[in-house]
Image (cartoon, helix red, strand yellow):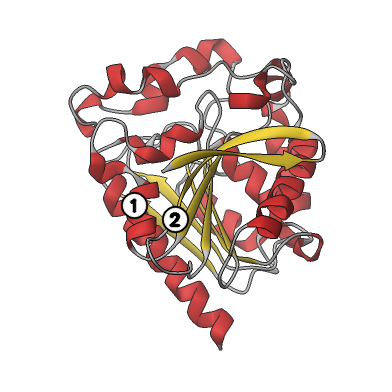
């Protein structure tokens, strides 16, 4: 795993890159973190089995974990962050830059968590404007809030972010301290707009989508009727799959269930590769 930078329409974004050894990648997994985290969320600091970057490369994929605009290297240039629409422009540009300099195999598979899920949905809408996307795999992101972030102190409620602490490896909170970053002001200011933005974005997704909700997810409504409506709005996607991850809280990729979730996500990528080949 190494650190690289990407040119995003004149803004430099930082990223973590892990590539398969001695072989060209079968595809690229683009991992996009949520609010208040950084790209290291996908590198499992508490236990090696948690790392998506290590697992993906071992199975023949390049894994690119991007620091979203306002995080990592770009935090100095964008101290107030960006709106979702602005981040969409930069992520598309960054992926175009990456694709021009690195082998991408069959294409790009976008895997995202929480706010990152909003960004990859927005990025994949009207996908003809971007490098080839194979599919989307999103955890911790729905379309109906159970609690609006920032309202009534909900953003400071650790139970919503983590769920039961027994679901995480020992030493998680010390080892993850370097992954935490302040959510930029402009990003935080529009969190409540997502339920209004989603109905416009969802019908424009034309690639397979898999959504995962943790057993102890507390940010989103994820009852059967909620999930049925969520899937129905992704009306142009050729395949929509909604899964539940047992023994997991909102931050799935930092928990004991991380490897299970990552393997399921990469299995979905395998399905997407089969579809692309056919």
| Residue depicted at x 56% and y 15% | 182
Q: Where is residue 121 in the image (x, y as percent from the top left)?
A: 66, 51
Q: Between residues 74 and 177, which one lies in front from this camera angle?
A: 74
Q: In this view, does 165 lie to the left or right of 242?
A: left
**Which mark is first along the chain, 1 or 2?**
2
User: Tag 1: Cα neighbours inside 10 Å, few (<14), some, or many (≥20)?
Assistant: many
C-alpha separation, residue under disc 2 versus residue under disc 1: 20 Å
User: Tag 2: Cα neighbours inside 10 Å, few (<14), some, or many (≥20)?
Assistant: many
In the rendered image, is residue 69 in sight?
Answer: yes
Task: Point out which mark residue 19 bears.
Answer: 2
Residue at the front extreme, as displayed: 22
Q: Between residues 238 and 64, which one lies in front from this camera angle?
A: 64
| Residue depicted at x 30% and y 40% | 248
Q: Between residues 49 and 11, which one lies in front from this camera angle?
A: 11
Q: In which quarter of the image is residue 55?
A: bottom left
Q: Is residue 61 left or right of residue 48?
A: right
Report the number of discs. Answer: 2
Disc nearest the viewer among 2 and 1: 2
Quadrant where the N terminus sits is top left
Task: Point out which mark residue 261 bears.
Answer: 1
Give SS at disc 1: helix
Residue at the bottom extreme, as displayed: 278
Q: Where is residue 206 in the image (x, y as percent from the top left)?
A: 69, 68
Quadrant where the C terminus sits is bottom right
Residue 252, placed above or below residue 153: below
| Residue depicted at x 76% and y 47% | 93
In the rendered image, is residue 71 in sight?
Answer: no
Q: Where is residue 181 in the image (x, y as percent from the top left)?
A: 52, 18
Task: Point out which mark residue 185 bears.
Answer: none
| Residue depicted at x 68% and y 31% | 69
Residue 88, placed above or below residue 162: below
Q: Position of residue 192 (x, y in %)?
A: 68, 27
């Amino acid at each position: 795993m190494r650190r690289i930078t990407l040119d995003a329409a004149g803004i430099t974004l930082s990223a973590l890159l892990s590539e398969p050894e001695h072989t060209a990648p079968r595809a690229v997994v683009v991992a996009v973190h949520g609010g208040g985290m950084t790209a290291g969320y996908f590198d499992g600091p508490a236990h090696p089995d948690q790392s998506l970057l290590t697992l993906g490369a071992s199975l023949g994929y390049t894994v690119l974990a991007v620091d979203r605009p306002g995080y990592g290297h770009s935090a100095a240039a964008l101290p107030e962050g960006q709106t979702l629409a602005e981040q969409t422009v930069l992520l598309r540009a960054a992926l175009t830059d990456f694709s021009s300099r690195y082998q991408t195999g069959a294409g790009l598979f976008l895997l995202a968590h929480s706010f990152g899920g909003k960004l990859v949905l927005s990025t994949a809408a009207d996908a003809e404007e971007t490098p080839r996307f194979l599919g989307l795999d999103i955890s911790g992101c729905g379309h109906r809030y159970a609690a609006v972030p920032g309202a009534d102190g909900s953003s400071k409620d650790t139970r919503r972010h983590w769920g039961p602490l027994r679901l995480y490896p020992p030493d998680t909170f010390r080892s993850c301290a370097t992954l935490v970053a302040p959510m930029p002001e402009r990003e935080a200011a529009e969190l409540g707009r997502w339920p209004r933005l989603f109905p416009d974005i969802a019908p424009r997704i034309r690639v397979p989508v898999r959504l995962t909700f943790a057993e102890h997810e507390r940010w989103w409504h994820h009852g059967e009727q909620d999930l049925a409506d969520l899937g129905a709005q992704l009306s142009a996607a050729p395949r929509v799959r909604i899964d539940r991850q047992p023994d997991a809280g909102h931050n799935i990729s930092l928990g004991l269930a991380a490897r299970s979730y990552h393997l399921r996500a990469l299995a979905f990528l395998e399905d997407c590769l089969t579809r692309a080949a056919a």
